[in-house]
Image (cartoon, helix red, strand yellow):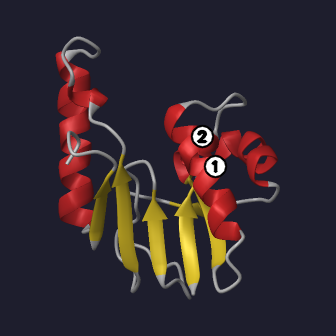
Amino acid sequence: MRVGYEVSSLQEPQLTGIGKATLHLWQALSKISVLRVDPYLKASRWKKRPVVERHLGRSPGLYFPGFPMQLYGLDVFHGPDFKIPRGGRFAKVVTVHDLVEFRNEYNSAAFIEKARLDMQQMIEKSRPDLIIAVSEFTK
């Protein structure tokens, strides 16, 4: 089985939160012999590729989350941080770790509105086959 794996959350030298979870899941999936796991980096993060490469030990592929695209040969694409591509003939899985983007005490009204629109577009346009919520509260 060939899995595309979104790695944009690995863009910082010191990982926290979702970055750490993304790296640990990458490491675990990469050890499963029946899987071929290919990392993909969001085009807007391409300048951060050297940092991502250091975390992964290899270079990621490039994708554009806002545009329909074919990532040929994939069976599944997993976005561990809200990001998945549009289009494609593969199953799409997205993980939602938390909803802090929607909290007034942490973000401005404009930021919250953009986060809401991003989430809505991801669901309506990228059409995930499965959404994983990491807690009952997030669910």
In the depicted structure, whether residue 30 falls above or below residue 46: below
- Horizontal side of 29 relative to 86 (left or right) equals right
Residue 58 in percent (x, y) is at 80, 59
Q: Nearer the viewer, residue 4 or 20?
A: 20
Q: Position of residue 52 (x, y in %)?
A: 71, 46
Q: Three-letter amino acid code at disc 1?
A: Leu
Q: Is residue 124 visible?
A: yes
Query: Residue 49's spot in the image, x, y percent?
Result: 71, 46
Within 10 angstroms of label 1, few (less than 14), some, or many (20 or more) residues? some
Q: Which residue is mark 1?
A: 23
Q: Which mark is residue 20?
A: 2
| Disc 1, SS | helix
Quadrant housing the N terminus? bottom right
CB atoms of marks 2 and 1 within 8 Å: yes
Residue 53 left/right relative to 81: right
Residue type pointed to by label 2: Lys
In the image, residue 63 above or below residue 103: below
Is 109 on the left-hand or right-hand side of 80? left
Residue visible at 43% across and 74% down in the picture: 69
Picture quadrant where residue 79 is located = bottom left
Q: What residue appears at the point 24 percent right and 47 percent down from the top-left corner?
A: 119
